Image (tube, grey):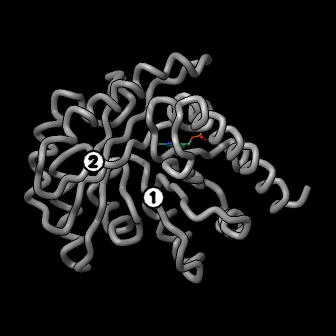
Amino acid sequence: MDLHHTLAENVAAIQTRIERACLRAQRDPQEVTLIAVSKTVPAATVRAAYEIGLRNFGESYGQELRDKAADLADLTDLRWHFIGPLQKNKIKYVVGRCTLIHSVDSLELMDEIEKRAAQLTINQEVLIQLNLSREETKSGIGETDLEKILNGLAQYPHCRGVGLMTMPPFFDDPQQAAPFFARLHELKNSQVAIKREGVDLRHLSMGMSGDFEVAIEQGATLIRVGTAIFGGR
Ligand SMILES: *Cc1c(COP(=O)(O)O)cnc(C)c1O
């Protein structure tokens, strides 16, 4: 089948599911942004996804982001999100190219992001990634470190912390992810009232192909969906 047609069908089905989840949670679908996770997807396919109306794309690898952003530079309102584990030496590919970095998990990383953002004289928005299940294989801070990181953001005049991100363990039954999403929401609620320089917690980045409806019911504002749009990687 034609690529545009397949993508449009997949996205329409996802949008219906987003709307239904919002209805159940009595939320406005406008509050939920669909980020199409395009890691490993060729630039030509990303272009097709743009042409059927998607604007937000998520990438996990620095060089892949750099190369695709170059290929698609003519699409000036396309927004990239960095969602992968972030290493210091990859920061140069990410800062300034991405609307939002979802995966900050240390102030050491923030030092590097700030340096690069200052060089480019831009303001870089970031999310703090939490590892709520404490799985060894996942990046992200533990919840006890959240205050320390949020307090630390004041030192970075070219950066702004705009929310939290998490990735729960994989469950066959997506409902089992609900407590992790609910916990991220609680953490945001407990911190949002504290006024801090450089911090404005408006986003919850949570939910993937298998569990985005559950995440929406628990307050997600950014959902990161790859395989349900582009097929298996
Ligand atoms: C790959 C990835 C996704 C998308 O996963 P799908 O199951 O393909 O929707 C979302 N978030 C992160 C952090 C990822 O690495």
Vertical side of 189 occupied by 106: above or below: below
Vertical side of 228 occupied by 35: above or below: below
Q: Which residue is mark 2?
A: 201
Q: Nearer the viewer, residue 169 or 56?
A: 56
Vertical side of 178 occupied by 195: above or below: below
Where residue 203 appears, x then y in whole percent? 37, 47
Q: Quadrant of the N terminus?
A: bottom right
Q: Classify mark 2: helix, strand or loop.
A: strand
**Within the displayed image, which quadrant is ligand 1 positioned in?**
top right
**Residue projecting furthest to the front:** 26
Residue positioned 43% across, 60% down in the render? 62
10 Å crowding of disc 2: few (<14), some (14-19), many (20+): many
Q: Is residue 33 left or right of residue 87?
A: right
Three-letter code, disc 2: Leu
Three-letter code, disc 1: His
**Residue projecting furthest to the right:** 1
Where residue 71 appears, x then y in whole percent? 59, 77
Q: Classify mark 1: helix, strand or loop.
A: strand
Q: Quadrant of residue 189?
A: top left
Residue positioned 40% across, 24% down in the render? 180
Q: Quadrant of residue 231?
A: top right
Q: Quadrant of the C terminus?
A: top right
Asked if ligand 1 lies within 8 A of label 2, the reply is no
Residue positioned 31% across, 47% down in the render? 163
10 Å crowding of disc 1: few (<14), some (14-19), many (20+): many
Q: Which residue is mark 1?
A: 81
Residue positioned 59% across, 53% down in the render? 36
First-in-chain label (2 vs 1)? 1
Where residue 226 appears, x then y in whole percent? 62, 46
